[in-house]
Image: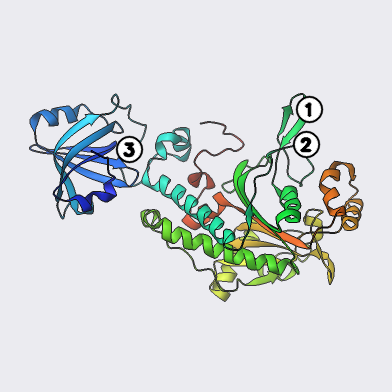
Amino acid sequence: MERILSSQLTAHVGATVRVAGWVHRRRLLKSVAFLIVRDAAGLAQVVVTDPAARAALEQLTEETVVEVTAMVVATATAPAGVELTDPTVRPLGPPAVPPPFDLYRPALTATLPTQLDNAPTALRHPTRSAALRISAAAVAGFRAALDGRDYVEIHTPKVVASSTESGANVFALDWFGRPAYLAQSPQFYKQLMVGVFERVYEVGPVFRAEPHDTVRHLAQYTSLDVELGFVADHRDVMAVLRDTLAGMLSAVTERAGGALATLGIAVPRVPAEIPAVHFTEALKIAGAPADEPDLAPAHERALGEWAMAEHGSDFLFVTGYPMAKRPFYTHPDPARPAYSNGFDLLFRGLELVTGGQRLHRYDDYLAALAARGEPVEPYAGYLDAFRHGMPPHGGFAIGLERFVGRLTGAANIREVTAFPRDLHRLTP
């Protein structure tokens, strides 16, 4: 008999079926016992009245893996309107050692460190797994939105020879006796691949050896990177980002509706045109000094409140960041060279995306490096492509965990990360 999932039971009323999963909870009453079995699709209620079967059920612990063969009966009071009767319950392994928290309760009461220490079992809780389902749906939407525009998915090295890719600190490692580093982003490679495919994207890990110990930072996270050629300026990149976000949120609605319901959240609307303010105006709105070189978290929160109050938008573009705060490959604003053709996208008052137009002329790269007092040699392999013709281009990167955390309202980004890596955590 083929196994079915709990979500399929309503289509088998009156039939004998086989389900399998984990013992989610046992309720041992005087004349009847209830066994709640959890599988990937949800919960199934099993009614046990036979004395021998009840005695066997008493020996099972929560999280023991079992198989149940039983009759499907329609019952309005049962989960999904059906329950399983006259069951044969067969353990598929030894009794499980109960985890240090009750997975059957509506919310996990354990502290976040305890949950993270016991992640393989904590992630079984519906509220934790729901965030991961939303994450998977968002990535599917990201890919679908770009595939529909003829982008090509690429896969770039995560071990690199140079630590000069950006201002972030790097993780050094030994590569057969030679120094190497974990990649801080696929930035250089995705730019080079614009010279091959014109439009590319990547989903992959990036590594930042920055000693942050905050609720919004990880040392390893998943980056959704995009780069496109033949742009007029950064506004073309912003338009693609807007449509990509809309595709991601649409996919979350379509593919993760159950997870959204579990967490009690609604997907925000992406405006047809996301409001945008220049960095200098953003400082005024946030009440920051005019000579502030960057936006602090408090400024971002103030801007998020302003965007909602003035435009009814959960999203806000901040454009024209000072060139001094942007990587050397950023294209300056031709009309205001001290400012960049770069942008950040704020989502509910939190920086979610960084992007912009890049330099595309070899001589401009030489001048940009010279202006910053940096040597050319460490960048030689990267810069060589620009000697052979590169179109005007730009791109952006979305932090997946930060996106899901903001969407779900998580207080800590680790709540939506399966196995977070940060300043203190390398296991499990």
Secondary structure under tag 1 reads strand
Percent x, y of residue 68:
21, 36
Specify whether residue 353 is in view.
yes
Does label 2 or label 3 sit earlier along the sequence?
Answer: 3
Specify whether residue 349 is in view.
no
Read off the residue under disc 2: 161
The amino acid type, in three-letter code, at marker 3 is Asp
The amino acid type, in three-letter code, at marker 1 is Arg
Q: Is residue 69 left or right of residue 243?
A: left
Q: Is residue 295 left or right of residue 12?
A: right
The amino acid type, in three-letter code, at marker 2 is Ala
Read off the residue under disc 1: 178
Read off the residue under disc 3: 102
Q: Which colour scheme is used?
A: rainbow
Percent x, y of residue 300:
63, 61
Contact (CB < 8 A) between labels 1 and 2?
yes
